[in-house]
Amino acid sequence: MNINATTIKVACSSCNLRELCMPMGISVEDLDRLDGMVATRRKVKRGASLFHNGEAFTSLYAIRTGFFKTCTSTDDGRDQVTGFQMAGEILGLDGIVNDHHTCDAVALEDAEVCVMPFDRIEELSREVNALQRHVHKIMSREIVREHGVMLLLGSMRAEERLAAFLLNLVQRLHARGFSQSELVLRMTREEIGSYLGLKLETVSRTFSKFADDGIVEVRQRNVRILDTDALRRIVNTQTCV
Amino acid sequence: MNINATTIKVACSSCNLRELCMPMGISVEDLDRLDGMVATRRKVKRGASLFHNGEAFTSLYAIRTGFFKTCTSTDDGRDQVTGFQMAGEILGLDGIVNDHHTCDAVALEDAEVCVMPFDRIEELSREVNALQRHVHKIMSREIVREHGVMLLLGSMRAEERLAAFLLNLVQRLHARGFSQSELVLRMTREEIGSYLGLKLETVSRTFSKFADDGIVEVRQRNVRILDTDALRRIVNTQTCV
DNA sequence: TGGCTGCCTTGATGTGGATCAAGGCTTGAC
DNA sequence: GTCAAGCCTTGATCCACATCAAGGCAGCCA
């Protein structure tokens, strides 16, 4: 691998994720101005962390391959998975406010990320309006996503939570060219539970219930959705008892 | 009120909230460049909305006086309070991603906000680096705050939630020059419950429990905190049981 | 003044999901 | 092949909070 090859490979302009990732919505003319945004790539082994709570913040990370979870924890040791991220999504936004990260980002499978020094992003986004706008949108999207999670945690019951989770996951995978009905969970039942505010036993039981009802087929971490509409109905109606 | 008076009044540079609000951290030299950021002021009566879910997004709003809640809702009518906002805080960030708002912002008491057209913010933040950085920090802060709420909703019990809520509220009020121990709740028990993922009866009972334990004094919406450390201990230890 | 209306408190009872416990399956090391 | 470590499933029991229900209190209007 010579320097030239690396240079070409790292360019956003030739990245097949560009329609999902940082340069989304940026015109062809502007695209080459972005090619200095990614300083380098970094590989993260399964189980390893991209960054830790408390670590100094320098960069945002765009996921090229692999799957991450982010989690915060309290002083007294509890922790909470705050999200699962996949290719094209951005990690590290939590670090901007205090110049250090406030959560851990852990790879759930071997992964590779593009390292984008935040200074450089700010510099470029002063020049490229579309990038500025996009950075704002990415952060706003995260805020809106979290509103959705708050709604889920604050007012849904176990079945609704899991149904919403599965629908969200396949929808995002589908946007990346995967099946609308089959997925492989990269996380444990316990991690799903943490994200959804449930215990792992409840997650497991709810999967079994869905399977009994013919809504999904579950074999370990392989899930096949048999009845997407049933999941949608569960999310939308369950409340009223 | 003549035009000149209005102009002066609207300037960030002469606003007594500037150390808490949008121009925070901006140097005196840059401050006057910001004075075009606020297009106008807007009054919102108690019970009225500043913006609604679905409404077109044009501006961010800085709260000058008053108190707001923001809430999202599902198709099937449930809703969830996603936050309470007070003077110096920014409303409307949720609207950036899709050019329309995804929640309602409702005044819980008569309020006044500074209307900052987002185009103008973007324009100015290309020129004033400190503003650019500050906008990023505000959004990042909101993301981190929501992580905290997810932790609360996902893993705390009723007493911990209410204790954390009260501590957060007085801390923010204190930063605005109010007492560290006395506060007036601007929201109903039901709104607190929605925010904390509890029913209003549980909120009420938990207040009564704290009062019985001598931790707070509650008379309607007037709350006096008698033992801040006890509240802190409740937040930090309750889990393990 | 009287009587709404909205909000809050408190008690009795019910229940969804947590907790405790036991065992099964899968994977990987040796 | 055997064994151990993780992870998952399922059953029995428990409990925190929801739900249902009945007043109480303060503020407002007629």
Image (cartoon, coloured by chain):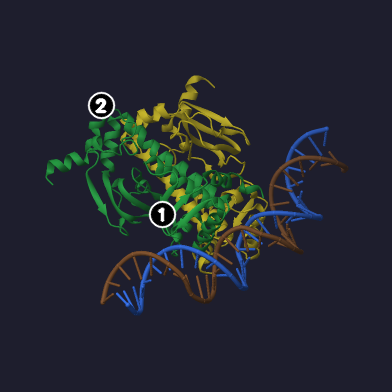
Chain colours: A yellow, B green, C blue, D brown
C28 above or below D28?
A: above
Q: Residues within 10 Å of mark 1 (few under 14, many from 20)?
A: some
Q: Is residue A6 above or below residue A68?
A: above
Residue at x 46%, y 43% (from the top left corner): B145
Question: Residue B185, labelled with which disc?
Answer: 1
Residue at figure coordinates x 66%, y 64% from the top left: A212
Chain ID for label 1?
B
Residue in the foreground of this view, choosing between B181 and B24: B181
Q: Residue A9: x percent and y percent?
A: 48, 28
The amino acid sitting under disc 2 is Glu
> Are the residues under badges 2 and 1 in a single subunit?
yes
Q: Residue furthest left?
A: B2
Mark-to-mark CA distance, 2 and 1: 39 Å
Q: Position of residue B121 (x, y in %)?
A: 28, 38
Q: Find disc 2 in the rendering and name its residue.
A: B29
Q: Chain of mark 2?
A: B
In the shown orientation, is residue A1 left or right of residue C21? left
Marks 2, 1: nearer the viewer: 1
Question: How far from the left and from the top, in percent, is residue B204?
Answer: 50, 60
Task: Find residue B55 and report its horizontal and vertical position in percent.
Answer: 31, 55
- The quarter holding residue A122 reads top left
